[in-house]
Image: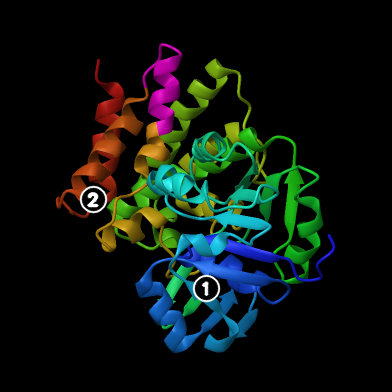
Amino acid sequence: MNEPYPEVAVIGAGSIGCFVGGHLGTHARVRLIGRERVRAVIAAHGMRLTDLEGGSVERAPQELDFVTDIAAASAARLVLVTVKSDDTPEVARALAPVLRKDAVVLSLQNGLRNVAVLREALPAQTVLAGMVPFNVLHRGHGRLHRASAGTLMAERHPALEPYVERFAACGLPMILRDDMREVQWAKLLLNLNNGVNALSDLPLREELALRAYRRCLALLQDEALRALKAAGIRPARLTPLPARWLPSLLRAPDAVFGLLAQRMLAIDPLARSSTWDDLAAGRRTEIEHINGEVVRLAEQHGMRAPANAKLVALVHAAEQGDRRIWSREELWGALRAAASAR
């Protein structure tokens, strides 16, 4: 790479995009591209990026390049896409006439279909899959806190390798992998909790400490694992336990789970899922790109995933204004009844 500080564009600079881009900007020229409301906050307050381990990075407003026009990505050699999955088709179309042909486009999004959408719209560019394993908590006034642990992962490709040292230097190491489909499914298995967390209206750590909510997640994962087995997909191992053992751990009594799952509970006390954040802000959630993917995979193989389908319906109802808090007994009962129905 000839330039000592290659330009990077972050498309969809919300909590994840600003956290990653804010860190990366300490070792590269980074342009954040996002909504006006976020730009105004950054212009007024800059950024303070913190994490569970006590790390802190301060970025003054004058150090940050935040714009709202996607055409400003035209000079970028590396483009990080962090928009919601529903917005990917529109963003892909907007990027097509803008990007340089040698740009590397890295999707750091939830869901499984974003890379295919980006590749179809950007055939001249190198489009790669990535995965962000941690939650970022927005505390207002430009304060962003990494609320859980995990290491960035991305699809192995020679075009991405020159940037790996930049990520590591700014405190965001990235592992390059040859099995990103399996990695994405493993992440999705964990993200099946997003809707449960949103409906519980509890912080993640409190929700996961309650067995009935964990049984909901275990049921959702059981359906997903059956569908994955039918599809011949073996999820990557992202946790100390293999994915197939997670439902059993989740069903364990609270005291046992607390002892065995300390890493899973290493979450900021205030952290919530992105689905909760979306409902609280009145935005569309990504439930169709998470639990909905399990429903579709099951159907492709002549199976059903009724508990996941029920959770999708409940979250859609919340999007439409039926924002009720589901107690652990109510939610477990609803999902169990759906799974038992003939």
Give x and y (percent) for residue 183.
Answer: 63, 39
Please give the name of the residue rendered at 38% of the width and 27% of the height, measured from the top-left corner.
Answer: 295
- Which is nearer the eye, 240 or 305? 305
Give x and y (percent) for residue 135.
Answer: 51, 61
- Which is nearer the eye, 3 or 327? 3
Number of numbered labels in the structure image: 2
Q: Earlier in the sequence, mark 1 or mark 2?
A: 1
- Which is nearer the eye, 335 or 77? 77
Please give the name of the residue rendered at 64% of the width and 61% of the height, measured from the top-left corner.
Answer: 76
Q: Reply yes or no: does residue 148 show up in magenta.
A: no
Give x and y (percent) for residue 139.
Answer: 42, 77
Which quadrant: the N terminus? bottom right
Give x and y (percent) for residue 289.
Answer: 41, 39
Q: In the picture shown, does residue 184 fall above or below 231?
A: below
By secondary structure, the bulk of the magenta-drawn segment is best described as helix
Which quadrant: the C terminus? top left
| Residue 147 visible in rendering | no
Give the structural element (helix, strand or loop) at label 2: loop
Give the structural element (helix, strand or loop) at label 1: strand
Pointer 2 residue: 326
Q: Amino acid at mark 2?
A: Trp
Q: In the picture shown, does residue 37 fall above or below 165?
A: below
Q: What color scheme is it?
A: rainbow
Q: Amino acid at mark 1?
A: His
Residue pushed farthest top?
A: 302
Disc 1 to disc 2, C-alpha distance: 27 Å
Q: Which mark is residue 145?
A: 1
Q: In the picture shown, does residue 92 fall above or below 164?
A: above
Residue numbers of the magenta segment: 293-304
Q: Reply yes or no: does residue 295 show up in magenta.
A: yes
